[in-house]
């Protein structure tokens, strides 16, 4: 059960990151998403979160390891920064939030792969 759930979680994580980059590129071009383009990222993010909760329930000790706590903190920051990046209209502000959101996303992926001892 765990290997399948982990594979699903990784698939959802990569899909979510790709959809964010795609939406960000559309946002930079001034295009708005419609139809499935608007709701699909939310569905993938919901499935990603549910798979993460299931993995934590199955395999994580309590209290959560510090790397996972840091990952959750970066996730919250990423959600806020990505929202600002997608909605900003002024170029300098959009650039700042885009870079910060992508940096937080990179930090999430780093922690997921490295799982540092701290």
Image (cartoon, grey):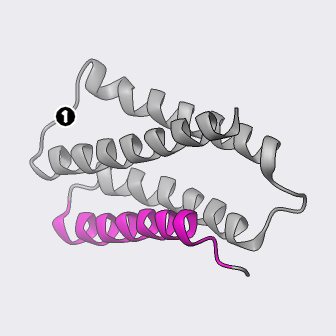
Compared to residue 59, the image places residue 93 above or below, namely below
Q: Is residue 117 above or below residue 113?
A: below
Q: Residue at x 49, y 45 (%)?
A: 10
What span is in magenta? 90-116
Give the structural element (helix, strand or loop) at label 1.
Answer: loop
Which residue is found at the position 39% from the left and 63% from the top? 101
Q: Is residue 87 left or right of residue 89?
A: right
Image quarter hosting the N terminus: top right
Residue 87 among magenta residues: no
Along the viewing direction, whichever of 95 and 66 lies nearer the viewer: 66
Residue furthest out toward the left: 29
In the rendered image, the vertical position of residue 82 relative to residue 31, given as above or below: below
| Residue for point 39% across, 47% down | 14
Residue 27 lies left or right of residue 55; in this view the side is left
Q: Quadrant of the C terminus?
A: bottom right
- Is 99 positioned to the left or the right of 106 in the image? left
Magenta region includes residue 107 = yes
- Furthest residue to the bottom? 118
Q: Residue 106: image x %, image y %? A: 41, 67
Q: Main secondary structure of the magenta part?
A: helix
In which image quadrant can residue 53 be found? top right
- Given the current orientation, which residue lies at the most extreme top position? 35
Where residue 46 appears, as percent x and y from the top left, is 55, 32
Seen at 20% across and 62% down, the residue is 90
Judged left or right of residue 40, residue 29 is left
Q: How many numbered callouts?
A: 1
The percent coordinates of residue 17 (x first, y second) are: 37, 49
Foreground: 72 or 115? Answer: 115
**Residue under numbered circle 1:** 32
Q: Residue 3 at what x, y percent from top left? A: 63, 40
Q: Residues within 10 Å of mark 1 (few under 14, many from 20)?
A: few
């Amino acid at each position: 059960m765990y290997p399948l759930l982990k594979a699903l979680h990784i698939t959802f994580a990569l899909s979510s990151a790709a959809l964010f980059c795609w939406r960000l590129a559309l946002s930079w071009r001034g295009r708005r998403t419609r139809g499935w383009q608007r709701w699909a990222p939310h569905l993938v993010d919901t499935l990603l979160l549910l798979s993460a909760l299931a993995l934590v329930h199955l395999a994580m000790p309590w209290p959560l390891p510090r790397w996972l706590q840091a990952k959750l903190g970066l996730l919250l920051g990423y959600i806020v920064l990505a929202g600002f990046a997608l909605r900003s209209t002024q170029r300098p502000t959009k650039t700042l939030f885009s870079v910060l959101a992508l940096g937080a996303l990179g930090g999430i992926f780093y922690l997921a792969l490295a799982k540092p001892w701290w």
